[in-house]
Each structure stands twice: as C-alpha cells, then as structure tokens.
Image: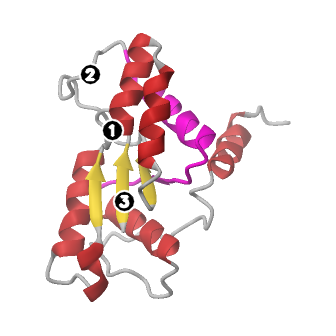
C-alpha cells in the first residue's frame, strides 16, 4: 500500500510520515505492514507551489496523474502552528493558499483524501484510523499514546463533508 502525506509548509507532514513509518516498521507492526510505503510530500506538492508562485497549472496536471498511483492520500490540517523560518518556500505563499490549492487540485482530480488533525499521538491515531478505514479493517489500530480521541466522522475523507461543517460554522446565528 502506498500512502502519500501532503500538506502546506509547517503543517507537520514530515513528522506524521516519520511517525507512521515507525508504526509500520516498529516492533508492534503486523505482518501486512511490510508492504506499506509512506511518501512525505510527493511531487504533487512541488507542483502546487510552482502553480501558486508562477501560475503554471500544467505541472499540477502531470503530477496529479503520477499521484494517482498512491492508494491513499492523507492531507495534514493547519491546526499546528507554523514556526517561522523553518520552511524553504516563499513567505508570499501562505499556508492557507497552499492548503486551499492542494484540496482543490485533489478534488478536481477526483482523488479521495483524509484530512488529519490533532497534536502528537492523537494526530497519529487519527491517521491510523483513516488508514484502517480505507483498508476496511474491523479491528482498531494499536493505541499510539494515552491521549486517544474518538473518530468523529466516517466520511472525513469527503471534502464536501468538511466543507459543510465549516460553512455551517461561518453562517450568522439567528438570534
């Protein structure tokens, strides 16, 4: 199974990819874990940055075609504060713009993805739940830490679901 971890600069994608790799190759890994490949920011991310910086969507089209070789796409949410100066991309490209372009590109390319939120072990646990859900596993993955958060949405990989959630939160209340 090939899993792509995508996200804007400073969103924790490299850390998440590292922790997932440790989970699948560590001493508690199951026998089917040997066939898992975790890719941290495959070529699609570079194409997103080029598209935003130079208005060059053709690179995204080519990278998207290559990206479809992945079985599962995990997109890191923007809930982790970005530490200044720790990324090499232009400051003019905001995390929000990169995140929005990434999600639009995946949606237009008909690539299903799960958005992964949380801090520390809870984030890894959320990713493992998304992987288990995609695999159709009936068993819960092994807990990564004591701080476990329940899986709240069976359809979190559906961008429309997340869109409805946030659209509802932005509507003015009728008081």
Q: Quadrant of residue 95?
A: top left
Residue denoted by label 2: 89
Residue with the most extreme right position: 174
Image x and y of residue 28, in percent? 20, 84
3D distance between C-alphas at marks 3 and 1: 13 Å
The label shown at residue 78 is: none
- Seen from the viewer's position, the closer of residues 144 and 107 is 107
Question: Which numbered mark, 2 or 1, is in the foreground of this view?
Answer: 1
- Which image quarter is the N terminus in? bottom left
Q: Nearer the viewer, mark 3 or mark 1?
A: 1
In this rendering, position of residue 26 left or right of residue 170: left
- Viewer-nearest residue: 62 or 86: 62
- The mark lying in front, picked from 2 and 3, is 3
Q: Residue at x 37, y 24 (%)?
A: 49
Label whose residue precedes the other's in the sequence (2 or 1): 1
- Which residue is depicted at the point 22% across and 51% down? 15
Give percent across and percent down for residue 90: 28, 16
Q: Earlier in the sequence, mark 2 or mark 3?
A: 3
For the residue pair 149 and 97, the one nearer the viewer reads as 97
Label 1 element class: helix
In this picture, which residue range is highlighted in magenta? 93-120
Q: Residue furthest left?
A: 27
Q: Secondary structure at mark 3?
A: strand
Q: Is residue 139 among what the camera can see?
A: yes
Residue 92 among those drawn in magenta: no
Label 3 vs 1, first from the N-terminus: 3
How far apart marks 2 and 3 lie (CA) works out to 24 Å
Q: Which residue is mark 1?
A: 43
Is label 3 in contact with label 1 (beta carbons under 8 Å)? no
Q: Which residue is mark 3?
A: 3
């Amino acid at each position: 199974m090939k899993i792509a971890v995508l996200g804007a600069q400073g969103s924790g994608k490299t850390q998440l990819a590292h922790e997932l790799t440790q989970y699948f190759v560590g001493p508690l890994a199951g026998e089917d874990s040997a066939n898992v490949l975790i890719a941290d920011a495959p070529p699609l991310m570079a194409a997103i940055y080029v598209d935003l910086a130079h208005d060059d969507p053709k690179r995204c089209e080519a990278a998207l075609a290559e990206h479809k070789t992945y079985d599962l796409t995990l997109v890191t949410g923007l809930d982790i504060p970005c530490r200044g100066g720790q990324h090499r991309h232009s400051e003019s490209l905001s995390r929000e713009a990169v995140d929005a372009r990434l999600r639009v590109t995946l949606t237009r390319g008909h690539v299903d993805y799960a958005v992964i939120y949380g801090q520390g072990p809870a984030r890894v646990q959320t990713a493992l739940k998304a992987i288990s859900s995609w695999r159709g596993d009936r068993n819960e993955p092994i807990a990564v830490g004591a701080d476990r958060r329940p899986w709240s949405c069976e359809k979190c990989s559906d961008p429309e679901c997340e869109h409805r959630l946030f659209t509802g939160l932005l509507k003015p209340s009728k008081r």
